[in-house]
Image: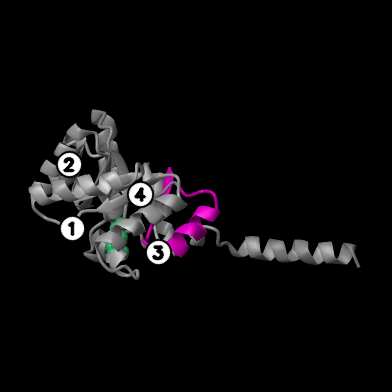
Amino acid sequence: MRFFIDTANLEQIAEANALGILDGVTTNPSLMAKEDIKGEAAIKQHYIDICNIVTGDVSAEVLSTDFESMVAEGKELASLHRQIVVKVPCTKDGIRAVKYFTDMGIRTNCTLVFSLGQALLAAKAGATYVSPFVGRLDDISSNGVELVSHIVTTYRYYGYETQVLAASIRSVQHIIQCLEVGADVVTSPLSSILGLLNHPLTDKGLDIFIKAASNMTK
Ligand code: G3P
């Protein structure tokens, strides 16, 4: 399973990248808006800065909602850097745009996916990635991990090449559950990635080893 970080924050991306286990980055308009970025040129430069930190795919989302504007915007984003994957919402115009980009050889991440039906359309349109939102489904008393599992099973049964990128990850548990159901990629905030390291027995064991080592050298 590949690991992406879900943030537009350069420091957090660099911190995760320094671990040596980071495979890519996903951003969205809300995450970009949290950073100190003003104007179109600065937005573009920010995506390039992200691409210069990591070696893997970087999802950059279109802001338009109609087909023609999505296509124009997506082409510009894709031309910024070879690592850019154009992120497109799973709407009627969005699916058309994903198909258009697929035919042009531009890679896409079909986002805001909340049902198997939406995931089917994304795969049929040739999306590189499909992003089911786990946490937001849990928020409405649905089951986000179950959707990830259904998409993985269905794609494998029919041989769709679209990769399942579990998004809206809120916890370590979400990461583990998505791993167990076979998600191709999980994109998480830095806190959840670092949270995977936490185990009280690791801390306790290390403490014992450090004390033993210091006794030996006294
Ligand atoms: O990858 C999508 C993600 O950024 C949304 O997360 O926590 O706002 O549902 P959240």
Q: Whole-Å distance between the Cαs marked 1 and 4?
A: 16 Å
Q: Amino acid at mark 3?
A: Asn
The residue that appears at 79% across and 67% down in the rendered structure is: 211
Q: Quadrant of residue 49?
A: bottom left
The numbered mark, 2 or 4, whose residue comes first in the sequence reads: 4
Q: Is mark 2 within 8 Å of ligand 1?
A: no
Badge 1 vs badge 4, beta-carbon distance below 8 Å = no
Magenta span contains residue 180: no
Image-quadrant location for residue 154: top left
Residue that label 4 marks: 58
Q: Whole-Å distance between the Cαs marked 2 and 1?
A: 14 Å
For the C terminus, which image quadrant? bottom right
* Label ID, residue 63: 1
Q: Quadrant of the N terminus?
A: top left
Q: Amino acid at mark 2?
A: Val
Question: Where are the magenta residues, as a range?
Answer: 1-22
Residue 168 position within the rendered picture, expressed as x and y whole percent measured from the top left: 31, 58
* Left or right placement of residue 199 versus residue 212 in this view: left
Name the residue tied to disc 3. Answer: 9
Q: Position of residue 164 (x, y in %)?
A: 31, 43
Q: Is residue 190 above or below residue 120?
A: below
For marks 2 and 4, give the CA distance.
Answer: 16 Å
